[in-house]
Each structure stands twice: as C-alpha cells, then as structure tokens.
Image: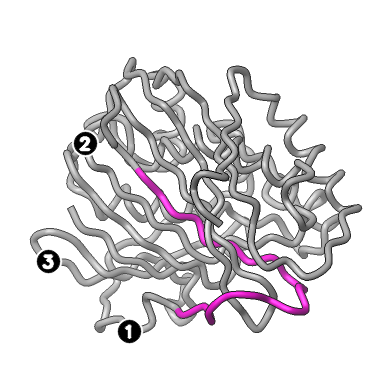
Amino acid sequence: MSRTTMKIIEVDKLPSPLSLNFGALRSSTKRSGLVEALPQVTYVRPHVVVDGKKAASYAKVCGFSPAHGVPMLFLHTEAFPLAMMLFGSKRFPWPAMGIVHLANSATLHQRVHAGDVVRIEMQTGELFQHEKGQVFTLHARALRDGQLVWDSTWTLLRMGVKQPQGAPYVSALSDMPPLSRQADFYAESGIGRRYGLASGDINPIHLSAITAKFLGFRRAVAHGMWTKAKALSTLLPREDVAYASVQVEFKTPLFLPARASLWAVRDEHGADFEVRNARGDKPHLRGRVSY
C-alpha cells in the first residue's frame, strides 16, 4: 500500500485520559479475521506547546534533575494519546486489552525546551510474527518549525492472534556485554498512579493492586516507560543533551512495590544496561543508550 493512501487525522483537542481508557475497554468487543496489514493512518496534533510544569512533574516522577531540562522521553507522553485514539477506533483491528509493549526506541535530534511549539505525529507501521501473537509497530515523531526534533518506534504485541503476519520478530538486544551493578532504586506501590498522572497513561494494571487483579495481574505493574525513564535518569549526563538515542526491550513485569537494580557497562558516549530485580538475577528491561 503506497503512502498516497495514507489517511491523515488532525486532532485539535484530545479526549480526556479517562475517555481514552473507556474507548480501549470498549474495543474488547472487536472480532477480526486475518489481518495482513494495519490501515495506513497518521494521527496528528498540529500545535502542541511543551508545558514546562507538566515536563517538570514528569521529570520528578522519573528521577530526572532540573539540570536535565525537558527529558528526552517526555514527548512520548504527548504522542501516547494518539495511540490510544487509534486503539479505540474502528480502524484498529484488535481489542486494546491484551496489547503488550515489547520494545521502544527513541531519538532526541535537537534539544526541546519548555514553551516550544511542536507538531506531534503518530503513524501505523509494520507487522511481525511472534510465537505469542501479532507484533506491530507505531512510529511517532515531533517537528519544530518543520525540523525533526524527536522520533520513536513502539513495538507492541497483540497476544493471542492465531495467524500472525510479517517477518519473524527478532530481538535487537540479544547480545549484551558483562554488566556491573550501578545503582539500586525503590519502586513504591503508588508510582503507577504518580506516573499515570504525569504521563496520562492510566491503564488500570498500573494504578493499584485491586484494579490490576481485576485484569488478571496479582499486583500492580510499573509502567515500562517509567522504568525506562528511571534508568535514563541515572545513565544520561547530569545536564540536558543535544542528542541522545535509546533502545529498550521489556522483559518481565516489575510488580509494585519492589526494589530494583540498575546494571550497566559505560563508555564515553553511552551504555548497555539492564534493570533487574533486587537480587540482580532477573531482567525487567534491557537497553542501549548513546549520547
């Protein structure tokens, strides 16, 4: 399918996070047959002002210092509602419940400052086969005055799809060098609620043990993107950077509350790393960052 068939949907006013989550829940009635490709659609927020207070709240929850400025993953929170709009729409073939975040990559191409005006885009991507279902990708980016400042690829798994399409999904981070313990941190029971308020991602599995159990989890689970940001708050230089690129794969859930450990091997311009459990023998997340 050529890009000339791409449908552009402009979003001037976002639905509330609660409304987006209700849309995701309503999508549970979807029943799709064989899906050979995602519909070619791009959701666009044409005029987004980077809110300094919102960025500061996000930074505090994730462990960034004021010297970091607007964290490089903050723009993910501005693109996330567009993905939720897609999942709740008739265009998306599968129920939103049962989607697992497998991997996430993001690149900061230019510094982003509070008060900047950016255009946020989110576009459907490719399909890959997985033993547990259908892998699909979403591609997000932010432009300032027509110049690319940030982009990201979200790799997601829709569990239970019987005839997954595309090439086999292959891990990009299967070979890691020996890592050493760098830091320990505590993920409190309320961090899912705090991150949800800062990011707009109020999926019930993250909010409390009660709401998580309703959806089949024994306890609340930390947001994968919080865990990624928490690791970056330690691994990135202690001031804002003009360029950074980070790729992670999510391995096992971080059930709340929990103690976790950061393992890494660093060089002058980056690091290979894992977030592991307190004992250091089980990875929750694996990644590579350069700056």
Mark 2 or mark 3, whichever is nearer to me: 2
Tell me the residue at 42%/36% (across/down).
75
Residue 67 horizontal/vertical position (percent) = 22, 31
Give the amino acid type for the residue marked by disc 1 in the picture: Asp
Tag 1 and tag 2, C-beta contact below 8 Å: no
Q: Please give the residue where the numbered disc 3 appears in the rendered image.
A: 267
For label 1, count other residues whose C-alpha is less than 10 Å away and answer few (under 14), some (14-19) or many (20+).
few
Q: Is residue 271 above or below residue 116?
A: below
Give the amino acid type for the residue marked by disc 3 in the picture: Asp
Specify whether 5 is left or right of 109. right
Q: Can residue 263 be found in the magenta stretch? A: no
Q: Which residues are magenta?
A: 151-170
Q: Residue furthest right?
A: 29
Q: Earlier in the sequence, mark 2 or mark 3?
A: 2
Q: Residue furthest left?
A: 268
Where, by quadrant of the figure, is residue 140 drawn?
top left
